[in-house]
Image (tube, helix red, strand yellow):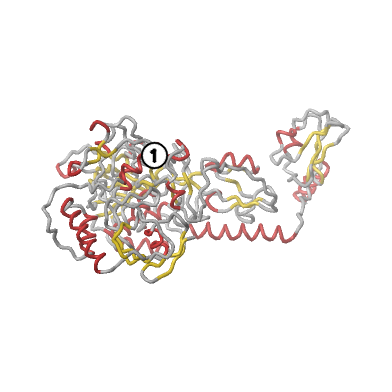
């Protein structure tokens, strides 16, 4: 370790560190335009100048390249240092008078105008783009040419570089934002769409999936990470002070013994592209409900502003209910939440813009606590409600006011007319459908299938969070469409059920279970694939099927399908059924 003093504060750093790194450890800010943690020091901008004192005297040096030495005394804000920095910034301002980063730095130092002759450049020749391309990407698609005042950055031979990967690293590190990738390569740029923002913004290869992610730590997208794809880059490893980056990690499948399982796989939004007449994926300003939700959120891609693709506020917005639900061609069930989140969207549009809002609905279903009141509130805000299903969304104009607009064509069933409404944005309130892996999860846990492919609970009223398999509980929208309060309540109930089962330490078996008569069993094994609970195994020694009583639910599937009549239900024999029928008939006669 090396000990030195910066602005009167002692600090210890590892040998080989620079004065700038030591200052960063003390949280002392030294301005710089050419330094990057993932790159070797270069000292091009000369803005990070500091004053060094040693037994031989004092001198001005660039802190980003000067090594930390034992006993060194550094001063970062002396009159001599500040005056020298001002001269360097004035020179940069003369070279790049229109660059925001330079103008901002000059303003911080009290420089309103440079005293030197101005040029009209945008590159300060810091070399960050050249160094990141060579040192990290291992490509060298750009480099310095010429000397003195003719020095500049360019691809080899001033032509498009065939080796450029269009990764954009040079553009990311450029402090003046002057890199134009179209001048370096002809390869198309491949921005990574943000899944959380529904593709309306871009993300890096290292990212946190969303703000409330559990665990709330970054992940590396191995499909787009240059380090994992080519073995180059590794910038995130250079930045990580916790030394938490491990490029050699592999996916692991872990087996865990548990006493209960809660299945909460949620839902996904209906793909509105399946109904092509609404123009989703064809017209720019037709968005689905999740896209509008992200747009209207303060942390979304537009910062909470409701904007069209061209960046302007809409003058009219149409909200179409029941897209893909209550439709015999797609989903026949009602998705429950669509009406209410459509009302919320209408309220947000009214709150954030001056647009006219039109809600096209089949029936307004405001079923929950406070929902009807909210419906009346939105009515009072001047939102237009049109009872009728939209026929199509088109850009074919029939009148001058429809030019350049999205035209919503729908039947108004209350007035008995067909209406054409020109709007700037259309929001599609899509149905809630099971997740992509719902069928696989259902097979793994032997969960029944309900309407629309959702999971089937044991009883919709008496056991809404239990499945037919003991110890497996269901919660949330995997059972069917539901809103947030219902999902929270069901999640709490499922957690309580799992805890009570674990706390008991024992399982109550069904009174009626299947049993196989070994003398009559032919060993055909037809009952094994028929059993929905995997409760039947085949005994190789005895050549008969055997029922595991703890797994059996007494459904009777094996009894009905047994060709030899060897399977029967304990406590539900034919004699008992006949006695029940006889008792009913005697009671009817009397």
Neighbours of disc 1 within 10 Å: few (<14), some (14-19), many (20+): many
In the picture, measured across the screen, residue 452 lies left or right of residue 83, that is right
SS category of the residue bearing label 1: loop
Task: Let me know if residue 326 appears in the view.
Answer: no
Q: Is residue 189 above or below residue 83?
A: above
Observer-nearest of 475 and 418: 475
In the picture, measured across the screen, residue 568 lies left or right of residue 31, that is right
Task: Let me know if residue 355 appears in the view.
Answer: yes
What residue sits 59% from the left and 39% below the top?
A: 440
Indicate the position of residue 263 as horizontal and vertical percent values: 60, 50
In the picture, measured across the screen, residue 253 lies left or right of residue 542, that is left
Residue 275, picture quadrant: top left
What residue sits 78% from the left and 28% below the top?
A: 524
Indicate the position of residue 377 as horizontal and vertical percent values: 34, 64
As drawn, the residue found furthest toward the right would be 519
Number of marks drawn: 1
As drawn, the residue found furthest toward the bottom would be 8
Observer-nearest of 146 and 500: 146
Observer-nearest of 327 and 542: 542
The residue tagged 1 is 137
Indicate the position of residue 442 as horizontal and vertical percent values: 61, 42
What residue sits 74% from the left and 30% below the top?
A: 526
Indicate the position of residue 430 as horizontal and vertical percent values: 41, 46
């Amino acid at each position: 370790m090396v000990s030195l003093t910066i602005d009167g504060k002692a600090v210890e750093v590892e040998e080989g560190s620079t004065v700038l790194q030591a200052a960063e450890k003390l949280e002392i800010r030294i301005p710089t335009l050419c330094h990057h943690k993932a790159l070797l020091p270069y000292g091009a901008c000369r803005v990070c100048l500091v004053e060094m004192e040693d037994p031989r005297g004092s001198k001005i040096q660039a802190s980003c390249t000067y090594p930390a030495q034992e006993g060194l005394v550094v001063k970062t804000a002396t009159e001599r240092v500040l005056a020298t920095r001002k001269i360097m910034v004035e020179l940069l301002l003369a070279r790049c008078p229109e660059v925001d980063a330079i103008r901002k730095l000059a303003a911080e130092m009290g420089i309103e105008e440079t005293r030197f002759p101005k040029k009209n450049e945008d590159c300060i020749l810091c070399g960050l783009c050249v160094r990141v391309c060579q040192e990290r990407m291992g490509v060298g698609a750009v480099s310095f040419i010429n000397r003195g005042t003719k020095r500049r950055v360019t691809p080899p031979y001033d032509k498009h570089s065939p080796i450029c990967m269009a990764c954009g690293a040079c553009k990311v590190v450029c402090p003046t934002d002057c890199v134009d990738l179209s001048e370096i390569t002809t390869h198309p740029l491949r921005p990574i769409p943000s899944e959380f923002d529904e593709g309306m913004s871009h993300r890096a290869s290292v990212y946190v999936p969303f703000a409330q992610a559990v665990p709330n730590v970054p992940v590396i997208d191995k499909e787009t990470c240059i380090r994992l794809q080519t073995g180059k880059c590794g910038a995130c490893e250079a930045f990580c002070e916790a030394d938490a980056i491990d490029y050699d990690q592999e996916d692991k499948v872990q087996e865990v013994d548990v006493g209960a399982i809660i299945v909460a796989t949620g839902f996904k939004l209906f793909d509105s592209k399946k109904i092509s007449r609404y123009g989703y994926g064809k017209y720019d300003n037709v968005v689905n409900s999740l896209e509008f939700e992200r747009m209207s959120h303060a942390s979304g891609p537009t910062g909470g502003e409701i904007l069209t693709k061209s960046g302007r506020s809409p003058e009219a917005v149409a909200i179409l209910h029941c897209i893909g639900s209550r439709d015999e061609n797609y989903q026949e069930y009602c998705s429950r939440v669509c009406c209410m989140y459509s009302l919320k969207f209408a309220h947000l549009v009214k709150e954030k813009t001056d647009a006219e809002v039109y809600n096209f609905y089949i029936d307004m279903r405001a079923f929950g606590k406070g929902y009807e009141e909210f419906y009346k509130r939105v009515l009072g805000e001047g939102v237009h409600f049109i009872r009728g299903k939209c026929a199509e969304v088109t850009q074919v104009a029939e009148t001058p006011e429809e030019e350049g607009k999205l035209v919503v064509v729908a039947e108004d069933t209350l007035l008995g007319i067909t209406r054409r409404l020109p709007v700037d944005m259309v929001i599609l309130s899509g149905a809630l459908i099971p997740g992509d892996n719902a069928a696989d999860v259902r097979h793994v846990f032997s969960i029944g299938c309900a309407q629309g492919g959702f999971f089937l609970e044991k009883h919709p009223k008496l056991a809404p969070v239990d499945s037919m398999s003991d110890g497996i509980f269901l919660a949330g929208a995997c059972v069917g469409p539901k809103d947030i309060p219902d999902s929270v309540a069901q999640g709490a109930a499922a957690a309580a059920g799992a805890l009570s089962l674990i706390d008991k330490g024992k399982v109550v078996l069904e009174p009626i279970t299947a049993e196989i008569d070994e003398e009559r069993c032919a060993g055909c094994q037809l009952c094994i694939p028929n059993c929905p609970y995997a409760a039947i195994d085949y005994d190789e020694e005895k050549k008969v099927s055997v029922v595991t009583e703890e797994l059996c639910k007494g459904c009777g599937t094996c009894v009905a399908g047994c060709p030899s009549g060897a399977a029967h239900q304990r406590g539900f024999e034919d004699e008992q059924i006949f006695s029940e029928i006889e008792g009913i008939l005697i009671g009817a006669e009397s």
